[in-house]
Amino acid sequence: GENVEQHPSTLSVQEGDSAVIKCTYSDSASNYFPWYKQELGKGPQLIIDIRSNVGEKKDQRIAVTLNKTAKHFSLHITETQPEDSAVYFCAAEALISNFGNEKLTFGTGTRLTIIP
Amino acid sequence: DVKVTQSSRYLVKRTGEKVFLECVQDMDHENMFWYRQDPGLGLRLIYFSYDVKMKEKGDIPEGYSVSREKKERFSLILESASTNQTSMYLCASRTFLRGTFYEQYFGPGTRLTVT
């Protein structure tokens, strides 16, 4: 089955600086890579995703890059703000059937702290 | 807005008790999932259901069972709770269209303590 590794487990960044979180995956069939943000006391929420036919995707201050050859993908947050403090999870999934019985495999999470 | 609700935010049970965790979604989603979240281990899939009465084991199904009798409701059952099942439990749902990925929507979680 799929194995997703995520680094670092904790990250502290000065407000205004950039943050980068990296993930690797093992299953070459994986073709969908979402990132979820979990704020304190809440469930995770999707912030950006990328499909395997795309190398990079941006949404305002957030970007994700994908290297299928190396099987790794990264989340980049620029101009960090205090509200970016949260736990971030990467995930991978392979769409291989027409029955909807695929599943996401999550990384172990990164606790990002923005220092004012 | 999609809403996924879980029956309790906090639950304390004794070892050996049968525990029911309920999850309800209001967006007619086909897929529903139960995860447990532990520090340093991320989100691990316990069971999922891709349609009513359909279920599949996730990565850590031992000690758990599930029930999906109606499309909107997915229940997680701990037949005989043990202390190593103390954890945060998260329910999620998503729609499915053939050949397409969709976002998973998570509930707020149930923090279960087994003493």
Image (cartoon, rainbow, N blue to C red):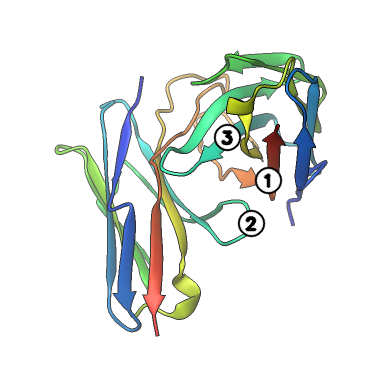
Residue contact at pointers 2 and 3, CB within 8 angstroms: no
Q: Residue at x 51, y 40 (%)?
A: B38
**What chain letter is assigned to the residue under label 3?**
B
Residue B31 is labelled as: none
Q: Position of residue B54 (x, y in %)?
A: 70, 14
Q: Identity of the amino acid at label 1? A: Gly
Q: CA distance from mark 2 to mark 1?
A: 7 Å
Mark 2, other Cα within 10 Å: few <14 / some 14–19 / many ≥20: few
Q: Which residue is mark 3?
A: B36
Please tell me which of labels 1 and 3 falls first in the chain: 3
Mark 1, other Cα within 10 Å: few <14 / some 14–19 / many ≥20: many
- Discs 2 and 1 carry the same chain letter: no
Judge left or right: residue B92 versus residue A34: right
Q: Position of residue A72 (x, y in %)?
A: 22, 43
Q: Which residue is mark 2?
A: A42
Residue A67 in which image quadrant = top left
Q: CA distance from mark 2 to mark 3?
A: 14 Å
- Residue A26 appears anywhere in the view: yes
Question: What quarter of the picture does the N terminus of chain A occupy?
Answer: top left
Q: Which residue is mark 1?
A: B109
Q: Position of residue B7 (x, y in %)?
A: 83, 41
Residue contact at pointers 2 and 1, CB within 8 angstroms: yes
Judge left or right: residue A72 versus residue B55: left
